[in-house]
Image (spheres, rainbow, N blue to C red):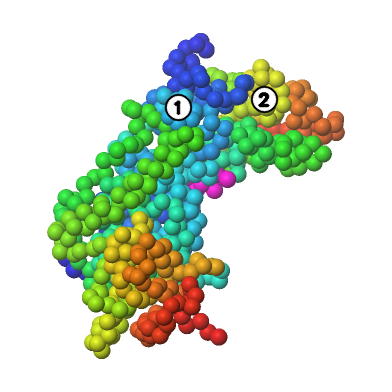
Amino acid sequence: MISDAVPRRELLDSGHLACPGCGAPLAMRLVLKELGEQTIVVLPACCWSIIAGPYPQSSLHVPLYHTAFATGAAVASGVRAALDARGDTETTVMVWAGDGGTFDIGLQALSGAAERNEDFLYVCYDNEAYMNTGIQRSSATPWGAWTTTTPAHEPQSTRKKDILAIMAAHRIPYAATASISHPVDLLMKVRRAKATRGTRFLHILSPCPPGWKYPDERTVDLARLAVHTRIFPLVEVENGVDWRFTADHPGDPIGPYVRAQGRFRHLDEAAIGRIQADVDARWEYLCRQVG
Amino acid sequence: MRKVIVGNHAVSLGVKLARCEVISAYPITPQTQVVEMLSEMCATGELDARFIKVESEHSAMAACVGASAAGARAFTATSSHGLVYMHEMLHWAAGGRLPIVMANVNRALGPGWNIWVDQSDSLSQRDTGWIQLYCETNQDVLDTTILAFRLAESVDVPVMVVLDAFYLSHTAEPVIIPEQALVDRFLPQRAARHRLDTAAPRAYGALVRPEDYMEMRWDQQLATTRAQTAFDDITDEWARLTGRAYGATEAYRTRNAELLLVTSGTITSTAREVVDARRAAGERVGLIKVKMFRPFPSVALRALLRGVPRVAVLDRNVSPGHSGIFAEEIRAALYDVACGERPNVFGYVLGLGGRDVTPAVINEVIDRTRAGTVAEREDLWVGVKA
């Protein structure tokens, strides 16, 4: 049944330049399987600027426009307008951005485009820091995490920004979270997004072995733990008001997830307790949204 | 058809006649009328273009980049802080070889806030790779807007059409509006040499290593330089079609001149009056207008200025710590002229932040230039209160 759900086409080649165990190419591979060849990708600065391959190569079988850090949503608005102007309403325009390009420097352009309900799919693959420049904190970095700009004796002191709620507040037609550990759920969300017109937003957690400091082979495992612990619940929101959970979230204790990652090594039990309390509070918020 | 219109609307009508396909803009004084009129045209269907009402100038240029990369004809308009806010994307547009056209209404930069004419905004974008064309009249503005699309698309380099705040943007003048059919023949729908195409997927703007980066900049350099001859050809064709001639430079009453003024923008019109009066009084004074700032018409200017004893460059801009920017460029261009034929260049900084440049000011410039043998400093400021 799962094999039927997963399209066989491969639009991402092997030989891309991701680090071993990187979650980001897994996410791209799955998303493009569902979107297909008639897709144009807009890529602001992020790890994927490297993963896609240097000139004159490309690891993707779809057109790709590399652009400046803040401009993913604005460039995509222009691409969409040009396609519409020439009568092509079928090609999907997709922004593929990291958390820095989405939560931080690209947020203004994204908010503007979402307010205008621009007809594109925006995917944020979130590795929870500026990994391409060497692991600096972003506003997607979780509380307590070590990065090179939040050293262990003074780790990230703020909560991760709730980007899904921000996007839902724009009342866009479709916003969802997805995980590489739940590929069928992810593909179904891409399918829904592809069939929807207007701004669609997909937030995919993308574990990063060098940045989170864990063994390469645990990427999918950690992505799954993030869902099961409710650190990264899988939800979808229609028009900003109709919230749904799309997977089981048993609510496992977060300890094993946190302890598996070197970026949290300095945290004591009290700190882990604080993270657990935050996770529980956000879960309650989501439950109220789902109703 | 002849209509009395402000310079901002001359831009809008030029964009409409060019059948621009994607417009993206953000409001800023004194440019706003350009996009107000275009919004109205798009809303009524008079212009069949997509208008993206972005949240910033940075996004305005980014949206033009996306539209142009996907093969459409794209336009934006801005001014002053809007222009410098989009600085990063000006590099992206030019380096990406995207033939975007932008109108920039010359306005001073803050602080303090100042909405009046000053060229420091556009000239501070000198090295972004954009062609820059300065306008003197509203007819010039309308024609240059149409010419800009043709020029940009012929060399795949973006073009900035520059007009003075208020003296052009908000001043009504009679303008001949070309027939749509004429413009359609002159400027057919854009056929992009490269575009985002799902039938031929390619990556644009990827990481480029040192072994290839220089060649990309070299190609850009060749194309931008080629814009000079391309502009000559395009303006020749426009002159045949409309009877209105334009050039990268213009010589006005330069015969036997002992002193030449060099101007750009609307100061030129005032300077023409002063030159006429001085000529009537028997003085050998003339005028060179510089319309094209990038690529800089060094060869033409060397030919025009060679052997003239004194040249007075009027700069409504300044590079702090150095001099007026046109003066700086002209000095550099003249360095290759043999010593005996090289003019003494007097570089005047005047009219900043909308300070009026009247005939009296230009007469003062001429008198100061005639009185000195060489300029005592690179930046001669005019009218600064003690």
**B211, A94: nearer the viewer:** B211
Q: How many marks?
A: 2
**Residue designated by label 1:** A58
- Horizontal and vertical percent for residue B110? 54, 67
Q: In which chain is the residue bearing label 1?
A: A
**B256, B285: nearer the viewer:** B256
Amino acid type for the residue under numbered disc 1? Ser
Dot 2 alpha-carbon crowd within 10 angstroms: few under 14, some 14 to 19, many 20 or more? many
Judge whether residue B165 is colored magenta: no
For the N terminus of chain B, give its image quadrant. bottom left
- Horizontal and vertical percent for residue A68? 50, 43
Vertical side of A130 occupied by B107: above or below: below
Q: Secondary structure at mark 1?
A: loop
Amino acid type for the residue under numbered disc 2? Pro
Which residue appears at 49% of the width and 34% of the height?
A: B209
**B115, A55: nearer the viewer:** A55
**Residue designated by label 2:** A209
**Horizontal relation, residue B266 to residue A122: left or right:** left
Q: In which chain is the residue bearing label 2?
A: A
- Horizontal and vertical percent for residue B334? 37, 65
Q: Which residues are magenta?
A: A105-113
Which residue appears at 62% of the width and 37% of the height?
A: A133
Q: Which image quadrant for residue B262?
A: bottom left
Residue A149 in view (yes/no):
yes
Which residue appears at 56% of the width and 36% of the height?
A: A46
Which residue appears at 55% of the width and 71% of the height?
A: B112
- Horizontal and vertical percent for residue A4? 47, 12
